[in-house]
Amino acid sequence: MPDQPQHDDEGQIPAASTSVLQRGLRLLPVLVLDALLVIACYAAALGLKFDGSVPRDSMVFFGQVIALIVLAYIAGNYFFGIYRTAWQYASLADAVSLASAVGLVSILLIGINVFLTPRHIPLTVTGMAPALIFLSMGVAKLWPRLRSQTPFTGWGGPAQQVLVAGAGHTGQMLAREFLQHPEWQYKPIGFVDDDPKKRGQRIHGLPVLGTRQDIPRLAATRGVDMVALAMSSASGATIREFVGFCQQADVSVRTVPGVPEMVHADAAAQLREITVDDLLGREEAKIDLAACAALVHDRGVLITGAAGYLGQELAHQLLALEPAVVHLLDTNETGLYDLQRDLAAEGLEARIWITNIVDRDQVERTFRSARPDVIFHTAAYKHIPVIEAHPEAAFHVNVVGTMNLCRAADAAGADQFVFVSSNKAADLDSVYGATKRIGELVATALAGRSKTHFNAVRLHNVMGSRGSVVPLFLRQIERGGPVMLTDARAMRYFMSPPQAVRLLVQAAAFQSDSAVFVMDLGEEVKIGDLAEKLIRLRGFQPGKDIEIVYTGLRPGEQLGEEPLQRRGKFLATEHPKIFLAPDTPATASDEIMGKIEELQRDLPEDRDELAARIHALARIDQRDVHAAPTFSDN
């Protein structure tokens, strides 16, 4: 009695058997089609060889062996995985696999035919038939993909004419997705690319029409509706220039996800607006993740100023390194609460502390309870004009608060204290810079007598942080203007919060002592150009819809920032974007903290006198205490 299908206790065929049966049924039409194609191709090759008059012996022999030939080709396809390939997403590698399967079987059949006597099927037939088989099978298997291409389907309605900027890997992926998905209503008409070797080439049937400078001309002559930037690794300067040409041509501009995000089926459809991060550069700083994880893994970490932009980003990145606990310290109750809820929504836990760093007793109580191993001190007043007008507030928070935190870290036996300073600490041309320099003096002075490793890390303008011009511009644009600029010639260096935090943690992971780390400044940005591009990206015209008003430099501000290479010879570290300052502050801890306490007890009421004494204190390690600058309101 023949074997019957096995059933379970309830009389049902097992799921595994059902799955095999379903796959076999789905594969049956494909096998039948391949068999018919092999038969047809061999018959056609015989007909071509004998000009339609195939000898009777050849026809009889063909009928006797064709089943074996069909089985040989189907077995070859199975061995090379042809029947497991999703041909609607086929690539060149899949075509090579098909060619290999057909070629290997054909070589085997030709080898057998060589030794046959008499030879009823000529060698030319066994050589011609494989070419026909490969072409016919290729067309049949690629038909789902070919059918999805625009020449077969059309756009089905009005579509935006899209010029793809960038004919590299990302650009060709984007164009291919647009061609395969006309329902997205993005019709690519060609590429622009600055590589002269690509000029005139065709990619997926689309021509490379010119360079970035040709965007205005192409927009006028080709009816371009939108430019899609397909340059995931482009610098901020490159993005700004492309955006400038698009705005000159009065066409909208979008950018695409990076290649990793585009592997999803419809990710390429998610064209998004150009952001400030795009304009200022989105290069990701590479770090030693193992060293950074070793710094905080299974340890207590405390972040001051945690409700701020930089503090929030720091909390997110540090929690990814799996510390034992993260303590979030700030006076901003709402900011801490919102951050804690955001982290909880991501499955991350943190403890909050509403602590005023100016209050020494409160700071010490917090540290005794939290017992942190690593402290990142980001809390500070940062608005330069405000600090110039209120130096006493900056002295209390930026100087006294830092001193209180350093003392508490020392008393609590913390392993690492990282003071987030500013490149303004090297210039000493503002009260803000002077307070940051004093913070560096306190931290590095304590390093000589404490078990705690004290370091300072100088960051420059962090996009979105308090004190940054970018969120100010965006708020002014949202209100309808005017956008207030200090000077048309003003230039600044920027870094994104993720980049700043990655470099900050990397510098801390070096675990040096009494060191001041300096970051590579990157690209300099003209503030006026940035403001104009932000206005245009919101759909407005500068000077027409939204005015730009120049107010003049405010106290403590400069037109530009001195490039790193002009600030002296810096010492290299293991990271190409992190350097050691050559002028590490050096003073005794008792001396610097004694001077701070003396100024705290006898704080001048006169603003200019207080600013002068803060500047003098910032130069104490230079023994130039009396040569401090004086200021006036004029």
Image: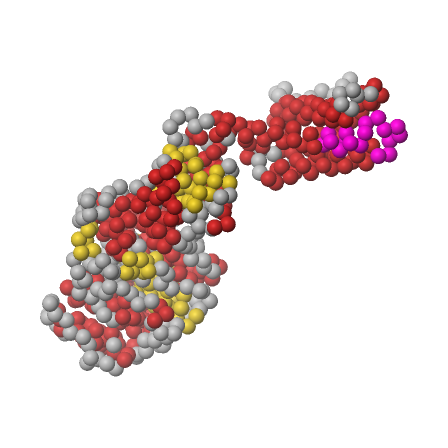
Residue 486 falls left or right of residue 321: left
Instruction: Out of 187 and 314, give the one closest to the viewer.
Output: 187
The question of residue 617 being in magenta is answered with no
Would you identify the image quadrant in which residue 98 lies?
Answer: top right
Q: How many marks?
A: 0
Would you identify the image quadrant in which residue 2 lies?
Answer: top right
Give the vertical position of 113 relative to 453 (above or below).
Answer: above
Q: Which percent across, then down, holds residue 113?
A: 83, 32
What range of the chain is rendered magenta?
A: 114-130
Instruction: Out of 492 and 304, give the one closest to the viewer.
Output: 492
Q: Which percent across, then down, holds residue 194?
A: 44, 50
Residue at the far bottom in the pictured view: 623
Give the vertical position of 481 relative to 79 (above or below).
Answer: below
Would you identify the image quadrant in which residue 552 lies?
Answer: bottom left
Give the vertical position of 389 relative to 584 (above or below).
Answer: above
Residue at the far top in the pictured view: 1
- Quadrant of the frame with the C terminus: bottom left
Q: Which percent across, then down, holds residue 21?
A: 64, 24
- Quadrant of the frame with the N terminus: top right
- Residue at 20 percent of width and 43 percent of height: 545
Residue 80 falls left or right of residue 351: right
- Residue at 21 percent of width and 68 percent of height: 431
- Residue at 42 percent of width and 25 percent of height: 156
The question of residue 116 being in magenta is answered with yes
Q: Is residue 67 visible?
A: no
Q: Is residue 49 visible?
A: yes
Residue 229 falls left or right of residue 487: right
- Residue at 33 percent of width and 63 percent of height: 459
Q: Which percent across, then down, holds residue 451?
A: 38, 72
User: What is the image's colouring?
Assistant: secondary structure
